[in-house]
Image (cartoon, rainbow, N blue to C red):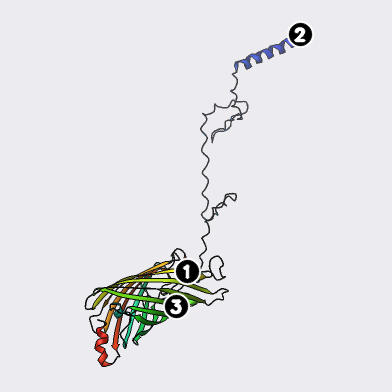
């Protein structure tokens, strides 16, 4: 009996606890992947005693943004670049510039070897016993510098100046002339020799208005690279078709040799055919004259060439054309004043190896010349009137 009563009492207590648990609503489950949050008491409030339900939690606040990281100090080294990044492409290499003084084209320096007074006369030579001495200043301009390298600043109007001294004497059918060009002005970046070129000219009359001319010339190469020598042999003719109009021309050949300071295996030389033409307008009294002319040069032979070059280089000549125009004032007896403008064609400015290291005409340039001449009649007094009257 007692055993049955104890079992019934325990059974009743278990049923009472079951009803109480059934009346307590279950706590909502925490979101998946997040542990259940345990609310912490606010600051300054003591925790509830054990066995006392915790006060309801305040609504959850949005999580605060993470604190801003402090800025890196100024002297902090930058992060290394990604070593796997491809390096920037390298620019294509520039084409080599050939500086050989022999890769060029040359004719004899200087331009005109005839007398200004004879240009306006019917003959090619001075009268017998005639002597002329004069000087001229030539200013050289060019798109190239004296180094003849593309991109360098060219020669302005007064960067380069020549002072040429010349003399001429006539023995009758034979005339001799000599000239020397001095470099009196050059850029501050260069140190070229003052004597630049010299020439000797002989002219022999063949008849009325015809003559043979032989001219020898030479001078230094730029940058002290050696010397150049040249010779011209021309057959000239002149004809006056009116008292105010004269035509003259010449046909012949020219030879140029380069004596380089460096050792060469092959000799460097060039042969050309020369064709000159000129038209002269003058007053009937020969007191004033103007002229215009052209000079064509055709290369016919050279050594060495591009197929069999020398270790120092090779020659690559091309046809060139020079043009000139001039005027002379001869009203004052025994004096001549003249101006001349010459445009010289020599090689290509984009290809330095087609030019020559010669200051006076070795590359494309323009020359402006202002000159003066004085003359004397050294013939016998009885022949003086006849000699100089033939020139007027």
Of labels 1 and 3, earlier in sequence is 3
Residue pointed to by mark 3: 231
Q: Residue at x 51, y 33 (%)?
A: 62
Please determine whether, in this image, residue 154 is positioned above or below residue 209.
above
Of labels 1 and 2, earlier in sequence is 2
Mark 1 neighbour class, 10 Å CA radius: few under 14, some 14 to 19, many 20 or more: few
Question: Distance from label 1 to label 2 (Cα)?
Answer: 147 Å
Whether residue 183 can be seen here? no
**Percent x, y for residue 361?**
41, 72
Q: Residue at x 47, y 64 (%)?
A: 351
Residue pointed to by mark 1: 300
Q: Quadrant of the C terminus?
A: bottom left
Residue pointed to by mark 2: 4
Left-right relation of 388 to 183: left
Please determine whether, in this image, residue 75 is positioned above or below residue 204.
above
Determine the image quadrant of residue 40: top right
């Amino acid at each position: 009996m007692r055993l049955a009563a104890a079992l019934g009492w325990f059974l009743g207590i278990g049923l009472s606890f079951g009803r109480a648990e059934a009346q307590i609503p279950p706590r909502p489950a925490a979101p998946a992947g997040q542990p259940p949050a345990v609310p912490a008491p606010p600051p300054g409030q003591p925790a509830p005693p054990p066995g006392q339900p915790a006060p309801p939690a305040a609504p959850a606040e949005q999580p605060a943004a993470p604190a801003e990281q402090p800025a890196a100090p100024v002297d902090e080294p930058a992060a290394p670049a990604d070593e796997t990044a491809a390096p920037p492409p390298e620019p294509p290499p520039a084409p080599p510039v050939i500086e050989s003084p022999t890769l060029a084209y040359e004719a004899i320096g200087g331009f005109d070897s005839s007398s200004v007074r004879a240009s306006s006369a019917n003959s090619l030579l001075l009268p017998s016993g005639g002597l002329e001495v004069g000087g001229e200043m030539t200013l050289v301009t060019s798109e190239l510098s004296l180094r003849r390298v593309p991109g360098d600043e060219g020669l302005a109007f007064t960067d380069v100046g020549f002072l040429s001294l010349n003399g001429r004497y006539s023995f009758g059918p034979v005339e001799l002339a000599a000239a020397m060009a001095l470099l009196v002005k050059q850029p501050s970046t260069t140190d070229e020799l003052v004597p630049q070129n010299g020439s000797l000219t002989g002219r022999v009359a063949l008849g009325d208005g015809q003559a043979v001319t032989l001219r020898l010339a030479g001078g230094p190469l730029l940058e002290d690279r050696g010397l150049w020598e040249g010779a011209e042999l021309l057959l000239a003719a002149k004809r006056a078709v009116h008292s105010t109009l004269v035509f003259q021309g010449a046909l012949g050949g020219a030879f140029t040799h380069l004596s380089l300071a460096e050792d060469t295996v092959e000799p460097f030389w060039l042969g050309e055919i020369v064709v000159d033409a000129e038209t002269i307008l003058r007053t009937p009294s020969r007191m004033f004259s103007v002229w215009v002319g052209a000079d064509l040069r055709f290369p016919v032979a050279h050594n060495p060439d591009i197929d069999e070059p020398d270790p120092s280089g090779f020659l690559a000549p091309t046809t060139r054309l020079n043009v000139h125009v001039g005027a002379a004032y001869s009203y004052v007896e025994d004096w001549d004043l003249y101006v001349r403008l010459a445009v010289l064609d020599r090689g290509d400015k984009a290809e330095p190896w087609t030019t020559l290291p010669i200051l006076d005409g070795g590359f494309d340039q323009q020359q402006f010349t202002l000159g003066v001449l004085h003359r004397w009649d050294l013939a016998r007094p009885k022949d003086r009137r006849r000699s100089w009257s033939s020139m007027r």
